[in-house]
Image (tube, rainbow, N blue to C red):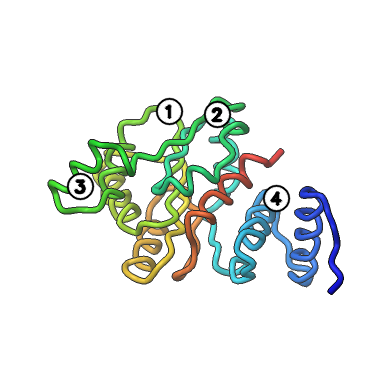
Amino acid sequence: MVYETLAPEEIEKKSMEIITSELNGRTWPEPKFSIVKRCIHTSADFDYADNLVFSENAEMIGVELIRKGATIVTDTKMAASGINKNRLAGYGGEVKCFISDDDVVAEAKSRNCTRATVSVEKASSIKGPLIMAVGNAPTALIALYNLIKEGKIKPGLIIGVPVGFVNVVESKEMITELDIPYIVAKGRKGGSNIAATICNAMIYYR
């Protein structure tokens, strides 16, 4: 078996060339194209070329929020760990994940609800530009929907890409009904890695 020995940056460059080629001429305006390509790169799944949906100008709204020092709140430590915090900090922003905070764990247990629900409630106290990036828990999107309707939180952008089977499709559809910019992966696919990838694509955009 013959294989190429490539440096890490060459591997990514070649991967993007392969993805672009296999998209057979399909393109999107930047930074949407970069988001789509990076999601395919992360998952090796070309379905993201069709199942990623963007509200009007959502990708550039996300870029501008990041440049204004936005806080990105994730629903999992995995998503938080995948976001380039150093680059984000260069704009004055930071990543927060409350899922394992003692007060969140205790509150969720006392109310018999998910920690993701309580985490979103805790995020409502954050001041300044806010991006909510949900890659795992549909209950986080449902809680977010309800809090927005109640006027208790207003993120500048929602990344709604939870993966799974129970309330996943429904929670994503709820987000698309809101008057809040969103990037959503239709259907069952998504994940914490996809949420982080979308964030990074906007962070890296020049």
Q: Secondary structure at mark 4?
A: loop
Q: Secondary structure at mark 3?
A: helix
Q: Position of residue 31 (x, y in %)?
A: 67, 49
Q: Amino acid at mark 1?
A: Gly
The residue to which callout 4 is attached is 30
Q: Position of residue 14 (x, y in %)?
A: 81, 58
Residue drawn at 27 percent across, 48 percent down: 115
Contact check, label 3 and label 1, Cβ < 8 Å: no
Q: CA distance from mark 1 to mark 4?
A: 26 Å
The residue to which callout 1 is attached is 128
Q: Amino acid at mark 4?
A: Glu
Q: 14 above or below 158?
A: below
Q: Amino acid at mark 2?
A: Lys
Residue drawn at 63 percent across, 54 percent down: 35
The residue to which callout 2 is attached is 68
Q: Is residue 152 left or right of residue 164?
A: left
Q: Secondary structure at mark 1?
A: loop
